[in-house]
Image (spheres, grey):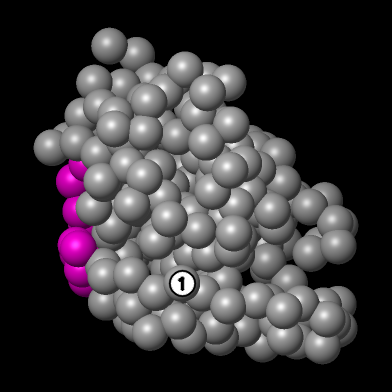
């Protein structure tokens, strides 16, 4: 069976449904977006109970906001890295530092105008990932989750056998987060971000599906790495 990739916008970012022999969800969007999620499923004719796994790339608010409601709706297990799971289980809402001037300005705006109005509904993480690769074949998806830190310490990416890479915020392609496609403007370490990208390229990444913005070819990242 082939692979189908569907995008649903849940507030400030994308979530992705990957369908092959099974269905998994990548990320859970901003808070209080369950109705938008349900409508998105209806448009692509996927039933909630078809989703076998919710794999969250990292613990920032715009990737875990509706996780508890989606888990209740679908009955699916949630997988997160051990360094990120407290964000969901305890409702933590950290923001990464800016990696350049634009990133610092953006984070400052988010702290002032977005974070005071957001809360996370906590829920348990069922599958705790570590730094080892996590196969998705048991969920009917030909691919794996790979630890790719840099934006945050416990960030993970999903790499399919087709070369499609779902990278959370290891890359971005949406204003005002950045102009055009490329590395994120904020994170914990640009050097570690680049190392993680080198790992994904070595493992065959071809197409980038960011948490914010449209997909783009991995050649954009290769060019950015070559400039250094």
Which part of the image, by quadrant, shows the N terminus?
A: top left
Where is residue 93 drawn, in percent x and y? 55, 83
Q: How many marks?
A: 1
Asked if the stretch drawn in magenta spans residue 135, the answer is yes
State the extent of the magenta-drawn residues as a range: 126-136
Circle 1 residues within 10 Å: few <14, some 14–19, many ≥20: some
Q: In the drawing, does residue 215 fall left or right of residue 82?
A: right
Q: Residue at x 68, y 66 (%)?
A: 184
Q: Residue at x 19, y 36 (%)?
A: 139
Q: Nearer the viewer, residue 39 or 181?
A: 39
Q: Residue at x 34, y 78 (%)?
A: 89
Where is residue 134 drawn, in percent x and y? 20, 53
User: Could you say whether the residue bearing mark 1 is in a helix, strand or loop?
Assistant: loop
Which part of the image, by quadrant, shows the C terminus?
A: bottom right
In the image, residue 167 sits, relative to residue 105, either above or below, namely above
Where is residue 152 drawn, in percent x and y? 49, 77
Q: In the drawing, does residue 96 fall left or right of residue 86?
A: right
Q: Is residue 82 at least partly visible in the picture?
A: yes
Q: Residue at x 58, y 43 (%)?
A: 35
Task: Please name the residue that numbered disc 1 is placed on.
Answer: 121
In the image, residue 111 sits, relative to residue 215, either above or below, namely below
Q: In the drawing, does residue 222 fall left or right of residue 176?
A: left
Q: Is residue 63 at least partly visible in the picture?
A: no
Where is residue 206 drawn, in percent x and y? 51, 35
Q: In the drawing, does residue 23 fall left or right of residue 99?
A: left
Residue 182's image quarter?
A: bottom right
Asked if the stretch drawn in magenta spans residue 65, the answer is no
Query: Which residue in the rendered view is the most extreme toward the top?
Result: 1
In the image, residue 178 sits, relative to residue 103, either above or below, namely above
Query: Which residue in the rendered view is the most extreme toward the left?
Result: 138
């Amino acid at each position: 069976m082939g692979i189908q990739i569907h995008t649903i916008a849940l507030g400030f970012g994308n979530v992705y449904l990957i369908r092959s022999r099974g269905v998994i969800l990548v990320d859970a969007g901003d808070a209080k977006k369950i109705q938008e999620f349900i409508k998105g499923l209806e448009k692509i004719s996927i039933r909630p109970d078809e989703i076998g796994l919710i794999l969250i790339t990292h613990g920032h608010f715009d990737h875990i906001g509706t996780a508890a409601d989606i888990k209740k709706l679908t009955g699916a297990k949630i997988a997160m890295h051990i360094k990120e799971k407290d964000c969901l289980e305890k409702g933590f809402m950290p923001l990464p530092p800016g990696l350049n001037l634009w990133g610092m300005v953006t984070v400052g705006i988010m702290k002032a105008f977005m974070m005071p109005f957001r809360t996370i509904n906590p829920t348990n993480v069922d599958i705790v990932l570590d730094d080892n690769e996590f196969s998705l074949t048991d969920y009917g998806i030909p691919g794996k989750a790979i630890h790719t830190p840099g934006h945050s310490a416990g960030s993970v990416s999903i790499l399919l056998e087709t070369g499609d890479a779902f990278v959370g915020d290891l890359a971005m392609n949406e204003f005002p987060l950045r102009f055009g496609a490329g590395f994120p403007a904020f994170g914990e370490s640009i050097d570690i971000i680049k190392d993680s990208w080198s790992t994904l390229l070595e493992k065959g990444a071809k197409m980038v599906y960011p948490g914010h913005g449209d997909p783009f070819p991995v050649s954009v990242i290769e060019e950015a790495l070559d400039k250094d």
